[in-house]
């Protein structure tokens, strides 16, 4: 007499707790904390917008009738100091343009720099504190991750042409700024008192996003 078929074994079923996401119930890793990155980009955009609002007209910067040879080194230094205070945002754009042109002329170095910045952002700066870095089955602590990124940055910057390109681009931009500031006569420039205050400088406005996404400021 044939025996009755054996019923399949019952699998345990666990119901997710109320309010828990399906990803958490399935045991998958939580997504990278994007609010910190979103807040950082928002602060960066706002800071850049506030700084660019202090930009002087480019026609005023390139007014050929306002150029003349300085009488002495002290005169050139005085002109440069006043022009730096007045055209600081324009000068920063000139240096950034020279730096960007230097990197764009060497796409491989640009890709290395972008990859390095992406590694810093996703492996350290904007990684959730409860998500350790796991590579090749090994879990790395925050200190090990930081040391690895610092070492990789040192190797990629100083054993490739990236550092030399950055330095050369900044030197070219600085030379253009110094030449313009020394030969531009600043007698017709009027520096607004609020903008002249150290606390309202364009550099502080542009770097205000460095307060950190998690600082709550």
Image: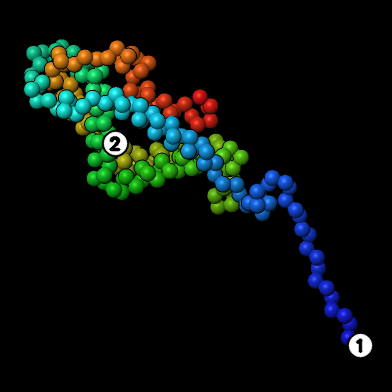
Mark 1 and mark 2 residues within 8 Å of each other at the beta carbon: no
Where is mark 2, residue-wise? 166
Whether residue 96 is visible here, answered yes or no, is yes
* Secondary element at tag 2: helix
The residue lying at 32 percent from left, 14 percent from top is 194
The residue lying at 23 percent from left, 25 percent from top is 56
Residue 93, image quadrant:
top left
Marks counted in the figure total: 2
Local crowd size for mark 1, using a 10 Å CA cut-off: few (<14), some (14–19), many (≥20): few
Between discs 1 and 2, the one toward the N terminus: 1
Residue 200: x, y in percent? 36, 18
Residue farthest along the right direction in this orientation:
1
Residue 49: x, y in percent? 35, 30
Q: Quadrant of the N terminus?
A: bottom right
Residue farthest along the bottom direction in this orientation:
1
Residue 27: x, y in percent? 66, 52
The residue lying at 43 percent from left, 43 percent from top is 118
Nearest the viewer among 49 and 70 is 49
* Secondary element at tag 1: loop
Mark in the foreground, 1 or 2: 1
Where is mark 1, residue-wise? 1
Nearest the viewer among 23 and 146 is 23
Q: CA distance from mark 1 to mark 2?
A: 87 Å
Q: Is residue 28 left or right of residue 57?
A: right
Say if 69 sits above or below 106 in the image.
above
Q: Is residue 209 left or right of residue 106?
A: right
Whether residue 146 is visible here, answered yes or no, is no
Q: Residue 36, labelled with which disc?
A: none
The residue lying at 34 percent from left, 47 percent from top is 111
């Amino acid at each position: 007499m044939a025996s009755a078929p054996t019923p399949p074994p019952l699998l345990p079923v666990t119901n997710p707790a109320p309010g828990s996401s399906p990803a958490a119930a399935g045991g998958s890793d939580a997504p990278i904390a994007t609010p910190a990155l979103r807040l950082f980009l928002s602060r960066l955009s706002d800071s850049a917008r506030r700084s660019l609002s202090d930009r002087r007209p480019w026609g005023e910067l390139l007014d050929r009738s306002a150029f003349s040879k300085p009488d002495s080194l002290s005169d050139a230094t005085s002109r440069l100091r006043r022009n730096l205070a007045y055209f600081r945002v324009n000068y920063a754009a000139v240096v950034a343009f020279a730096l960007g042109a230097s990197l764009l002329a060497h796409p491989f170095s640009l890709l290395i720099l972008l990859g390095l910045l992406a590694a810093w952002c996703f492996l350290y700066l904007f990684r959730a504190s409860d998500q350790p870095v796991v590579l090749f089955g090994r879990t790395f602590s925050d200190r090990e991750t930081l040391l690895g990124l610092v070492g990789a940055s040192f190797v990629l910057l100083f054993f490739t042409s990236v550092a030399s390109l950055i330095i050369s681009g900044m030197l070219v931009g600085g030379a253009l700024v110094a030449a313009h500031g020394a030969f531009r006569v600043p007698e017709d420039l009027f520096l607004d008192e609020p903008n002249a205050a150290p606390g309202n400088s364009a550099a502080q406005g542009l770097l205000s996003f460095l307060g950190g996404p998690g600082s709550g400021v």
